[in-house]
Amino acid sequence: MGGVEDENGPATKRMKLSPGVLRGLIDGLSSVEFVPNSLGDLMARPLAIEGDDEVVGSKGVIRKVELVRIITEALYSLGYKKSGAFLEEESGIPLHSAVVNKLIQQVLDGLWDESVATLRKICLLDKNIVKLASFLILEQKFFEFLDEDKVMDALKTLRSEITPLSINIARVHELSLSIVSPTKCAYVGSSNQSGTKEKSRSMLLEELQKLLPPTVMIPERRLEHLLEQTLILQRDACIFHNSEDKGMSLYKDHQCGRDQIPCRTLQVLQAHTDEVWFLQFSHNGKYLASSSSDCSAIIWEVDSHGELCLKHKLLGHQKPVSSVSWSPDDSELLTCGNEENVRRWSVPSGECLHVYEKAGNGFVSCGWFPNGKRMCFGTNDKTICMWDLEGKELDCWKGQRTLKISDLEVTKDGKQILSICREGAILLLDREAKVERFIEEDQTITSFSLSKDNKYVLVNLLTQEIHLWNIQGEIKLVEKYKGHKRTRFVIRSCLGGLDQAFVASGSEDSQVYIWHRGSGELIEALAGHSGAVNCVAWNPTNFHMLASASDDRTIRIWGLNDAKIKQKGPAIHCNGVHYCNGRA
């Protein structure tokens, strides 16, 4: 690249960035050196081009000048330097003005004083940007002096040029440390030890590009960004999009069909002898745990063909099993008896590893902390407790922290515990900061679930509505979902599918309901059960697998319409009797 010092020279001390990120910028900026008779005259022009207001496109919102400049930048970034230069020449629209082109070449050549002087000639209304850009240029000058062991020159640059800018004082102190202690140099900015001056100066140009207004320097790979944004917006607007493999093309607008939504019964699991109350897939999607009013829990294994088979039936509870919870590594499972004890099981062997009991109290909910060494239990005296694996109670939050029938969640960082604390409120307890926040509803809350990214809480209400709350920062209601039936019993819902873009819920009318999370639009009502559907669970790794648990004593596994069903005897038939909370 013209004017750059020897590539084998000492490394300059700047933050290391991916070379690929910058290649397009430098190809474009340095094309004047490589392509003869292309840009010399054009780059001397200002960017006040005749016809600046000319628009293209049927909507009349795209300025021709902007479009041409963005296409030119894209050609350079893709390595088509001759094509980019030819487009500039033929269109008469330069990528950069003469003064910006001069600044770019001076930076590449290491002419720091001239670069700062040229920078001030660019008509920038925000003088703070001029200062910040000057700081970056002089910082590069400082580091190159240090690389060349010109300590006094570096010190002079710091004292007489960088410090008088009176900005970024903390960074100035860091730079001074790099003079006093060479070992501090890597910490301050010398992460590019194996780089060359050319690369380091290229990185400086990228930083300047981010800082200067886009009308002065087109943002890196702007066309790619716009096209990606278009595809993402189309994908997000597609209410059926549910596959990473679903190809998206620039040749046509994106639209999926209903064939991406699990809507066909592939299996009916019939190992429980009473109502099935709760379901949860393991984090790795290889197992499904179910619990029932028959006082048992079952671990089902998902084989390589996506078929579920019974792995262990877990017996020992004397009361109905109200919920289950997988350990972070999926090697163990907690089962919670209804106002009874909590049991911890080995997933590989099915052995009961420990029984947790509290004198005078029964447990109503359970969950794991992210380290897998501590657990969280809700008790029927409205208390939340933290226990270790050996059965020692480590902490306790008393008061109105939970209800008799309650869900409980622990965030992935282990800092927050979520529990229904009143009929119309969910407690978000920050156990480290000792801060309590609340999701407040006007109606009675029957259940809730936490999204995989811990950003959202899905709340089921007595009024046959499901509400989605954003709990990041200020707690706010995001969306409402309607259509399912709930009059008497606890019905649970979940988020699932690709990027958890869907909401699924059970219903007392024996159907499974599916909504698009973003729009709230109801897209499926799945019939098949012969009793109230109490709980649903979406496989976190197979976006086309959904499970539902019902009062008809069965679990249904739902898949795509075109999925192959491997029938084993009567496995895909319902019981033939309609059940509702145990009554035929």
Image: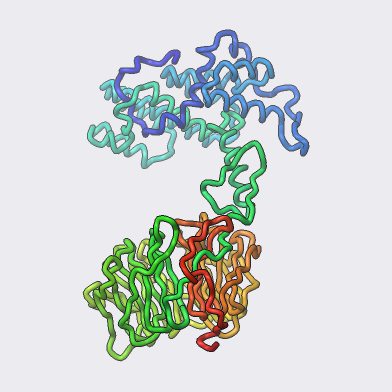
Q: Quadrant of the C terminus?
A: bottom right
Q: How is the image coloured?
A: rainbow
Q: In the image, what residue occupies the spot 58% across and 63% down? A: 263
In the rendered view, tell whether residue 129 sits above or below residue 475.
above
In the rendered view, tell whether residue 473 sits above or below residue 324.
above
In the rendered view, tell whether residue 392 sits above or below residue 42.
below
Q: Is 558 situated left or right of 379 in this image?
A: right
Give how far across and how far down residue 288 sits, in percent.
Answer: 41, 67
Give how far across and how far down residue 355 sits, in percent.
Answer: 26, 80
Q: Is residue 243 visible?
A: yes
Q: Within the image, what quadrant is residue 14 found in?
A: top left
Of residues 228 and 235, the one drawn nearer to the viewer in this rendering: 235
Q: Within the image, what quadrant is residue 400 found in?
A: bottom left
Tell how many labels. Answer: 0
Q: Is residue 472 visible?
A: no
In the rendered view, tell whether residue 60 sits above or below residue 444.
above
Of residues 221 and 545, the one drawn nearer to the viewer in this rendering: 545
Give how far across and how far down residue 85 sits, in percent.
Answer: 59, 17
The single residue placed furthest to the top in the displayed view is: 37
Q: In the image, what residue occupies the spot 65% across and 65% down? A: 522
Q: Is 360 situated left or right of 521 in this image?
A: left
Of residues 389 and 60, the one drawn nearer to the viewer in this rendering: 389
Q: In the image, what residue occupies the spot 51% across and 31% down? A: 209
Q: Quadrant of the N terminus?
A: top left
The single residue placed furthest to the bottom in the displayed view is: 360
Give how far across and how far down residue 564 sits, in percent.
Answer: 52, 57
Q: Is 568 situated left or right of 54 in this image?
A: left
